[in-house]
Image (cartoon, coloured by chain):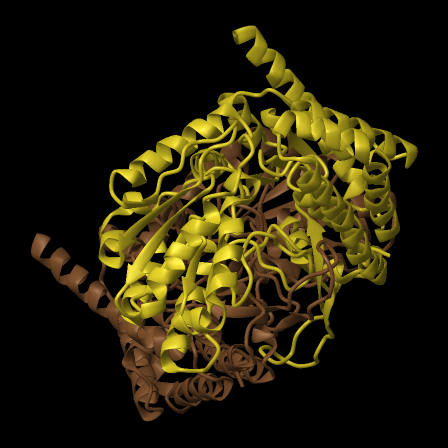
Chain colours: A brown, B yellow
Amino acid sequence: MTVQNEFNRDLIDHSVSLAKTAAEFWGVSNTNTRSKLLQGFATSLEQNQDDLIELANTETGLGAQRLTAELLRTVYQLRGFATEVESGAPYRQVDDKAVEGLPPSGRPHLTRVQVPLGPVAMFSASNFPFAFSVLGGDTASALAAGCPVVVKAHTGHSELSRAVYRLAKRVISTHGLPEGVLTLIENTNRNENGYLVQHPDICAVAFTGSYQGGKALWKLANERTKPIPFFGELGSLNPLVVLPEALEREGETLARTLANSITMGAGQFCTKPGIVVVLDHPLTSRFIDQLAIEILPLKTHRMLTPGIRGSFETAVSVVANRAMTVFQPEADGLGPAPRLFKVNANQFMEDASLREEMFGPAAVIVTASNMSQVLGVLNAVEGTLTTTIWGAYHATADNEALVRTAENISGRVLFSGVPTGVAICHAQQHGGPWPASTTPQTTSVGYAAIERFLRPVALQDAPAWVVEARRGD
Amino acid sequence: MTVQNEFNRDLIDHSVSLAKTAAEFWGVSNTNTRSKLLQGFATSLEQNQDDLIELANTETGLGAQRLTAELLRTVYQLRGFATEVESGAPYRQVDDKAVEGLPPSGRPHLTRVQVPLGPVAMFSASNFPFAFSVLGGDTASALAAGCPVVVKAHTGHSELSRAVYRLAKRVISTHGLPEGVLTLIENTNRNENGYLVQHPDICAVAFTGSYQGGKALWKLANERTKPIPFFGELGSLNPLVVLPEALEREGETLARTLANSITMGAGQFCTKPGIVVVLDHPLTSRFIDQLAIEILPLKTHRMLTPGIRGSFETAVSVVANRAMTVFQPEADGLGPAPRLFKVNANQFMEDASLREEMFGPAAVIVTASNMSQVLGVLNAVEGTLTTTIWGAYHATADNEALVRTAENISGRVLFSGVPTGVAICHAQQHGGPWPASTTPQTTSVGYAAIERFLRPVALQDAPAWVVEARRGD
């Protein structure tokens, strides 16, 4: 094992060293060069779509339909970042002309520019073999910012990672770029992952994965001699509040929509609604019945890895010991049986173990007697990627308090639809207060994700040649 | 002592509780309310200028001239933040209309809004009794964002803090605002400061002070069950590179300018140039002589506290044991004698103890044989608020490498003048890679400082009443 470790550490050193060298070139490259590379990646994924999806399906079991959608999303995302790069918006300069006179009103000429952080270590996710992996959103946004990326492949889809990386490497070479712009590290153990995070030439970390794994690496990033930004997107409960007004309008449809959102992809989404908050109301018990009826026939596919399946069953058994089981179907085939539990608001607020994420097709229904309890339940959640509110149609005091509370704990607040599915656009915010994200003021999806890898620098009385060279065009 | 501690903890609980209550009101207040409060603070400082400056001078010994300038800067800053609030820019919404069709191009309606983090704990600095204290930049920017502030007064100017707080309290009351918008905590010890940082209702921390003190509190913020953003502005070396081209043009003037920057305010500025990097060149030894000649007659005033004076003498003696002393004047009066040391680039790069901040009127001259050594010296600094480059007039390869290296380690890069004195404007960036700042992507001076206390939230398919209520106007 020691030999293996040292071998991997050498490989990590080598990859980071390539990235460091590439940073000198890539960090000052123009928007055209960056955009073309991202577009090249997109085209390459598209051209090899069938082979990649087959490989991904063999490794992850997520199914061709979902994987096709995810690959197309990844292609769309790469092209979107290319367009964003071309627009120059991420490198926008803020210029304050000199003002004659004494301070505070008198001042020198200041230009605020954006500089890339340097080589980024990126930890791929198990559940998004395309969109949060080798050429996923973290890679695209770091490259757009001018930062080379050292990708840590997820062992759940090693073959696919290697195949995508081979394609990427070819594109990099075709474009005449240094190979260190993107490197791949595989089969590293926990210590080696820590070694990568603490490598002196790594300047930032992007991570999508479990709370335990992410928190451990975040701690290591903070324990460095020189701590670095750690953009970790960890677990999330994604409460969904169903108000009576919504049930009056479309209770049945909502039950079906929610059933699908809880079980799709075997519930392996960081945005899966894990908590369904309902108010005491004549329509509520009917809604719960409908939800159970809708979930019952839904088949799940096998989970991503045996480890994830094991963790799901453990998490579910903890909740099962404390909550009422709404139904208990038999597991059918390779996938886990979906599970639905029920507790009241006081139980949920008092018992922290009911607030552990069940990563898989399961949810806890929390019954509240009044709006004050609903707010208490949300406040107990503390930090989540999303909160969904169905039925807040009008500006009542209760609804206003509900939305403010949802905003306080979430990165995204939905008023219709389900949180699974995250649109790629400028207004997106995929993050949220701890534990949803280690850096709640940043997003890991959407074009604002680029900002994570840039740092503002004020140039004071800079000569024209300096300012012009930093415009990116 | 135990009684004292519990008494202070009760006071902390009380202040935070007031802040939490005030957050519900202040977090949703409109721009007019916020702007008026900041303006009210400015006017109140202005009207009580004479008394405040006398009090500040008694406590800090910084002198009436400097303190007047600092008070006026604080007034200007409060009004500047008021104008920024009125412009609505900090709460700017990003709107992405819904697009018909399937993802990834089809999407719901998304509006990215900014929400305040909640109550902020603010630790005042010793060296800026107005600008980084009760009504200083951290307070102004947090309030502008909609966050109530719990100020921890610095013991170096307790009476002044109390006096400013009394004025602030009166303004808050006149405006009919809840008192918890701004509260003051005094005479807390380390444990109590930690207690404040770890208080469950504190949502972010702003800190300006020493590396040791700041790092300790930053660790406590990270060790919370729910870690929170910690905006710490710690120590800084502020290297200043003097190229021969600058000496040819204006060597004598530059020596005078630099001598003043090193000694002004008894060197008690986080932006004081602590490292002067010079290249082997016929003009260089003359410049060093001139610098010594210019510094020699400069008188310093007493330092802020006996503790700061003690730390300065300790820091200086560490360097004195390792470096050549360029001159050794007698201490004259209450202030410390300015000190100037000299080492070569290799010594500086090899010996980390030469890279400890000397907070006071002292600097280390580092002689480099070539540009590669200059870059090595800057890279050894790692993180600093500022780097100054004198003489990079033309776009040579050496100058380009020098500026890029300076950007990589700094929050601000100056091409003329000295780093002491930080303009308040949109383009300012006061921060820098660790250890200059715990959050190098944020600034603690200038209008972008508001962003530290806001968090983006994406509203998905939000009803009009929700979006409109978040426009701030």
Q: Would residue A381 be seen by someone viewing this image from the given angle?
A: yes
Residue B319 image point, x, y percent: 31, 41
Q: Position of residue B348 (x, y in %)?
A: 27, 53
Q: Quadrant of the C terminus of chain A?
A: bottom right
Q: Nearer the viewer, residue B385 or B284?
A: B284
> Which of these two is toward me, A357 or B170?
B170
Residue drawn at (23%, 59%) of the image: A188
**Quick one: B124 or B59, which is closer to the camera?**
B59
What percent of the width, then of the height, locates residue B29?
Answer: 83, 46
Give the quadrant of residue A467: bottom right
Q: Quadrant of residue B59?
A: top right
Q: In the picture provided, is A24 more to the left or to the right than A400?
A: left
x 46%, y 39%: residue? B359
Image spot of residue A391 (x, y percent): 78, 54
**Would residue A238 be found to the left or right of residue B373 on screen?**
right
Residue A1 seen in render: no
**Residue found at x 53% / y 45%:** A434
